[in-house]
Image: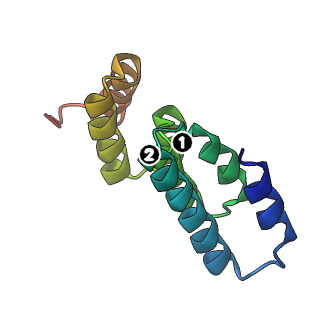
Amino acid sequence: SIRPVVRFLEAIPRLPPEEWDSLVSNVINIWIIEKAEVGGDPSAAGQLIRFIHDERCRMDAHVLTGNLASAFQIAQRSGSLQDVLFIRSCAHKAGEQELLKHINSFLAYTSPGQDYG
């Protein structure tokens, strides 16, 4: 259960935002790695994302937990073409066809005439 990890994070005195986001991101990474090693479900790590302050770190955490739609929403808001293309690549690898359609529509609307192959 992820609950003890949540309690742990809630009990830590607040660190400066960058250090805090780094700590939470590392906890998410460790959770995912440990669950993968024992064949468990790493998706519970998604519950930790709410602790991250920085949008970019939050986007990366969504990618790690497989929540590519949320990652795309953040990339869309930030306006980072590089992030949108990265998430499109992840969605392609994951076979998320509906998300790919949304991303491609977004790219066609924001950058008409560009070919991002």
Quadrant occupied by the C terminus: top left
**Residue 84 sits in quarter:** top left
Three-letter amino acid code at disc 1? Pro
Residue depicted at 37% across the width and 50% down the height: 83
Mark 1 or 2: the one toward you: 2
Q: Is residue 48 left or right of residue 93?
A: right
Q: Is residue 5 visible to the viewer in this orientation of the structure?
A: yes
Question: How many marks are shown on the rendered structure?
Answer: 2
Q: Between 58 and 27, which is closer to the camera in this rendering?
A: 27
Helix, strand or loop for disc 1: helix
**Please, which colouring scheme is shown?**
rainbow
Q: Measuring from the top left, give residue 26's x and y in whole percent.
A: 54, 67
Q: Is residue 113 left or right of residue 49?
A: left
Sequence-wise first label, 1 or 2? 2
Q: Measuring from the top left, give residue 48's x and y in whole percent.
A: 68, 52
Q: Which residue is disc 2 drawn over?
A: 36
Q: Measuring from the top left, give residue 92's x and y in whole percent.
A: 27, 30
| Dots 1, 2 in contact, CB < 8 A | yes
Q: Between 15 and 33, which is closer to the camera in this rendering?
A: 33
Q: Is residue 78 visible to the viewer in this orientation of the structure?
A: no
Helix, strand or loop for disc 2: helix
Residue depicted at 83% across the width and 59% down the height: 7
Quadrant occupied by the N terminus: top right
Q: Which numbered dot is residue 42?
A: 1
Compared with 12, 39 (above or below) is above
Three-letter amino acid code at disc 2? Ala
For the residue carrying disc 2, how many other residues have a C-alpha within 10 Å: few (<14), some (14-19), or many (20+)?
few
Q: Is residue 48 left or right of residue 74?
A: right
Compared with 109, 36 (above or below) is below
Residue depicted at 49% across the width and 42% down the height: 71
